[in-house]
Each structure stands twice: as structure tokens, then as C-alpha cells.
Image: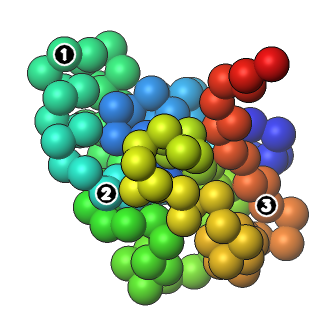
Amino acid sequence: LLCPKPRRVVICGGGNGGAAREVLKHKSVKEVFLIEIDPAVRNAAKRFIQSQSAALSDSRVTTIFADACNFEKWPEGCFDVIIVDSTDMGTTAGRSDHLWSQAFFEGCLSRLQPSGQLSTQLGACVV
């Protein structure tokens, strides 16, 4: 993470635990909120990819099953880092395309600390 000494982190998506695993490598991290829309993602990860999903059992990680666009479901306050680890736009019959909208990114920016970091997974480029 480029943010110096991040303490509070939100991961939008990331139900497999891989992003949380990497975030927790930063000793300054005190809270990670994983906002995952589909409990089946977490359940499958726990069954099939324990090396990634083990991070979801860390006491610093709180999983919230909700659409990340619903900012009312987010924890109170601002965050040092927001990571968008969602499916790629246009790959899931439009079910996650709203996570690429201007309104979503404006909502994310409103929840960042002034020196916070917003990171997105851009997926594969087709050339």
C-alpha cells in the first residue's frame, strides 16, 4: 500500500480473502472491513482456497454482506485505504457495473481520509 501507516481499510468485494491477506501484512492496520455482496464467495474460498481465505478469520477483519454501493451499510467514519476488488465491468451480465460508476467513486472519495488511497482492480485489457 502506498498510504503510510494505514489503520482503517475497506475492501469492496474481495470475498476470497486475498486482498485482506495482503493488507494484513502491514503492521499498522487495525481494522479491515470487507464489503462482499455474496456470502457464497466467502464460503467457496473457505472450502477451496484456504491459503487466501484464512485472512478472513483474523480478528481485525469484519465482513459485511452488502452491496458496496450502499454506503449506509459501511462502518462509520473515514478510511485510510479503500480497495475495490470487484469483478470486471461487463463480465457479470451487468451485476457489478455500478461499482464503476461516477456516483460510486464519489461516495468512496467522500469516505477517504484527506491523505487516503483509493485502489481499484482494473482486470485484463483486450487489445
Q: Which residue is mark 2?
A: 37
Q: Amino acid at mark 1?
A: Phe
Could you tell me if residue 100 is visible in this image? yes
Q: CA distance from mark 2 to mark 3?
A: 24 Å
Q: Quadrant of residue 78?
A: bottom right
- Residue at 65% across / 38% down in the picture? 121
- Badge 1 vs badge 3, beta-carbon distance below 8 Å: no
**Residue 39 placement (x, y as % from top left):** 19, 49
Sort mark 2 into few (<14), some (14-19) or many (20+) by Cα contacts within 10 Å.
many
Q: CA distance from mark 1 to mark 2?
A: 19 Å
- Badge 1 vs badge 2, beta-carbon distance below 8 Å: no
Q: Quadrant of residue 75?
A: bottom left
Q: Which residue is mark 1?
A: 48
Q: Nearer the viewer, mark 1 or mark 3?
A: 1
SS for callout 1: helix
**Residue 11 placement (x, y as % from top left):** 51, 51
Q: Amino acid at mark 2?
A: Ile
**Residue 53 placement (x, y as % from top left):** 30, 27
Query: Does residue 80 sit above or below 26 in this rendering?
Result: below
Of residue 32 and residue 52, the one placed in the foreground of this image is: 52
Q: Earlier in the sequence, mark 1 or mark 3?
A: 1
Residue 120 tag number: none
Residue 116 tag number: 3
